[in-house]
Amino acid sequence: MACLLTSGRALGCKTSTGGLKAVYFADYGTLGTTTIVDGEITAITGTPVFFKFDLKGSSTLEQTITSSRENGSTFTTQALNLTLPILDKATQEQIKLLSVARPHVVVEDYNANFILLGKDNGTEVVSGTIVSGANMGDMSGFTLSMEAMESDPAFFVTSTVVTALESATQIDPNA
């Protein structure tokens, strides 16, 4: 791999919006081969089924690049923090499954970006809470902290790659 830069970056307009809109989970190892064009996954040959969890509020994605001169190594830690309001049995059952699995995770943000975490090694739940709150205005629901360690930062994914493989099954926590 060449270590030479190929372009600069201009200061863009203030059109970006923070926040995560949804997260999609697929079983580890179901991606098959991915086609990557200019840093974006444009095709998946496997048979993943993406299960969509809608988000609102305080969910975050942060990627940390760690590089060592001494070891000549570089890797990226992909950290995802999810807040899922409303306690319900069906969601708790899915969280139990996520907690022991290593899913591939696609994050959709409010800028219409789809970003794949854990492409090669999967993503793991490292902690979480089931919260009922103390006061009437407190959150009652679930929090999850997930982490992936990959050689590269998370890849952008063409949205149709994910939505074409999306399951129609979603939990209604108010049902």
Image: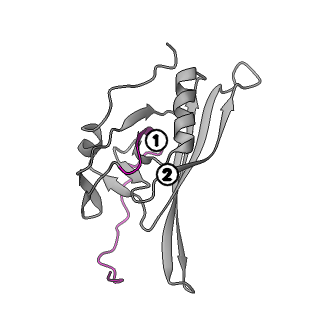
Question: Along the horizontal axis of the image, is 78 left or right of 15?
Answer: right
Percent of width and height locating residue 83: 57, 36
Q: Residues within 10 Å of mark 2 (few under 14, many from 20)?
A: many
Secondary structure at numbered mark 2: loop
For the residues marked 2 and 1, what is the alpha-carbon distance in whole angstroms? 17 Å
Q: Pointer 2: what residue?
A: 123
Q: Pointer 1: what residue?
A: 20
Percent of width and height locating residue 150: 46, 63
Tag 1: residue type? Leu
Residue 98 position (above or below residue 94): below
| Residue 87 seen anywhere in this rendered image of the structure | yes
Per the rendered image, the range of residues in magenta is 1-29
Q: Can you name the residue that lies furthest to the top here?
A: 175
Percent of width and height locating residue 15: 37, 49
Examine the structure image and report whether residue 18 is included in the region drawn in magenta: yes
Percent of width and height locating residue 97: 52, 37
Question: Along the horizontal axis of the image, is 91 left or right of 17?
Answer: right
Examine the residues drawn in magenta and state their main secondary structure. loop
Q: Earlier in the sequence, mark 2 or mark 1?
A: 1
